[in-house]
Amino acid sequence: MSFPIVGTGASAGGLEAISELLAALPSRNGMAFVIVQHLGPDHESLLIELLAKRTPMPVTQAGEGIVIEPEHV
């Protein structure tokens, strides 16, 4: 299956813009979204929990062996 993968990166200050983007998208969009957040090594990311509140698409942590799927973040 072929589908677009949209990659976005930001520091913690970009969270609002990413949240607004995801909130404006329809859940049935045929795209996968990969979000990369720049954080200091002492900070734990709350990105998954925060973005999951803004989109009906499933939001998961990337990791080794994960399959990128359309209509997922």
Image (cartoon, rainbow, N blue to C red):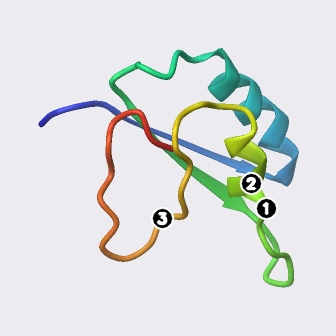
Across and down, in percent, residue 25 comes to 57, 17
Crowding at mark 1 (Cα within 10 Å: few <14, some 14-19, many 20+): few
> Is 29 placed left or right of 51 in the picture?
left
Which of disc 1 and disc 3 is earlier in sequence? 1
Q: Decide: is 39 above or below 31.
A: below
Across and down, in percent, residue 31 comes to 37, 29
* Mark 2 lies on residue: 49
Residue pushed farthest left? 1
Mark 1: secondary structure: loop
Mark 2 vs mark 1: give the one in front. 2
On residue 7, the disc is none
Across and down, in percent, residue 29 comes to 40, 19
Q: Decide: is 44 above or below 4.
A: below
* Mark 3 lies on residue: 62
Across and down, in percent, residue 41 comes to 79, 82
> Disc 2 and disc 1: Cα gap in Å?
6 Å
Mark 2: secondary structure: helix
Which of the pair 73/41 is nearer the observer? 73
Q: Amino acid at mark 1?
A: Leu
Residue for point 83% across, 34% down: 16
Q: Decide: is 15 above or below 60.
A: above
> Disc 3 and disc 2: Cα gap in Å?
14 Å
Q: Amino acid at mark 3?
A: Ala
**Tags 2 and 1 in contact by the CB under 8 Å rule?**
yes
* Mark 1 lies on residue: 46
Residue pushed farthest bottom? 42
Residue for point 80% across, 42% down: 15
Crowding at mark 2 (Cα within 10 Å: few <14, some 14-19, many 20+): few
In terms of image quadrants, where is residue 37?
A: bottom right
Crowding at mark 3 (Cα within 10 Å: few <14, some 14-19, many 20+): few
Q: Quadrant of the N terminus?
A: top left
